[in-house]
Amino acid sequence: MAVRLIRIIGEPVLHEATRPVTQFDDELRTLVADMFDTMAAADGVGLAANQVGVDLRVFVYDCPDEESGQRLRGVVVNPELETSEIPETMPDPDEDCEGCLSVPGEEYPTGRAEWAKVTGVDLDGSPVEVSGRGFLARCLQHETDHLDGTIYVDRLVGRYSRAARKALKRQGWGAPGLAWDPAAQQPADQEPADQEPADL
C-alpha cells in the first residue's frame, strides 16, 4: 500500500469525465488500497481516483453519517448519483462550507442537495448502494462530481465564486503539473498553503 500524490486543480485529469471500470483485478484493488491510504494521510473523508491521477470511475469514502451517528467507510465503483432537489438559494456560510483535497487549504459555501444516493458495484463487481443526508450526502455528491470532471469550485456562485478565483490566482493554481504529497502535508511542486488541506 502507498500514499500517492494528490493532483491540484488545473491538472487535466481532474477536469474530464473518468472512464468506467471494466477490469476488476489486482490492479484495481491496489489502486483502491492506495486511495484509502492517501485519504487517511490527507485527513480526508473522500477521494476520487482522478485526484490521484487515474481516470477511472471509482471513489473511496470514510465519512460520518448523521442518521446513524457512525462513520461509513467503503468504495463505490462506477457510481450513479441520485439526489433530492438542490437549493437555488445562496449557500449558508455557516452550514454549507465545503473543501477539497485538490484545492488544498480553501473552503467555500457550496449548494448541495440534502439527500443523496449512489449506486454502483464493489471491488468484486457486486451491487452496492450508499445513501444519506447532510454531510454524507455532500460527500457523495462531491466525489461523484469529481468522476464527472467537476470540482466543487465550478459550482460556486456569486461572491464565493469570485473569492475562489482570486484564491486560485494567488496560489498559482489552475495549470497542469501541480500536486501535493499528503505524507509530507505540503504541495509537491510549491510552497505549503497557509491552511491545512480541506477534507473532501
Image (cartoon, grey):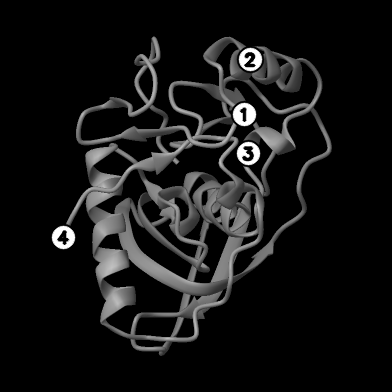
User: Which labelled disc corresponds to residue 1?
Assistant: 4
Q: Which mark is residue 152?
A: 3
Q: Please indicate whether residue 27 sits to the left or right of residue 193 in the image.
A: left
**Relative horizontal placement of residue 110, taking residue 63 as reference (left or right):** right
**Which callout, 4 or 3, points at the residue further toward the start of the chain?**
4
* Quarter placement of the C terminus: top left
Q: Position of residue 114 (x, y in %)?
A: 63, 49
Nearer the observer, 176 or 192: 176
Report which quarter residue 147 is drawn in.
bottom right
Identify which residue is drawn at 37% across, 46% down: 45
Question: The residue under label 3 is which amino acid type?
Answer: Tyr
Which circle's residue, 3 or 1, is located before the other in the chain? 3
- Choose the circle earlier in sequence order: 1 or 4: 4
Give the class, few, some or many, for how many residues have Cα within 10 Å of label 1's Cα (few <14, many ≥20): some
Left or right relative to 11: residue 76:
left
- Check disc 2 and report the residue beneath it: 169
Which amino acid type is marked by label 4?
A: Met
3 vs 2, front mark: 2
User: How many marks can you see?
Assistant: 4
Comparing 118 with 171, the one in front is 171
Q: CA distance from mark 4 to mark 3?
A: 28 Å
Is disc 4 placed on a helix, strand or loop? loop
Contact flag, marks 1 and 2 (Cβ < 8 Å): yes
Q: Which of the marked residues, 3 or 2, is nearer the chain's N terminus?
A: 3
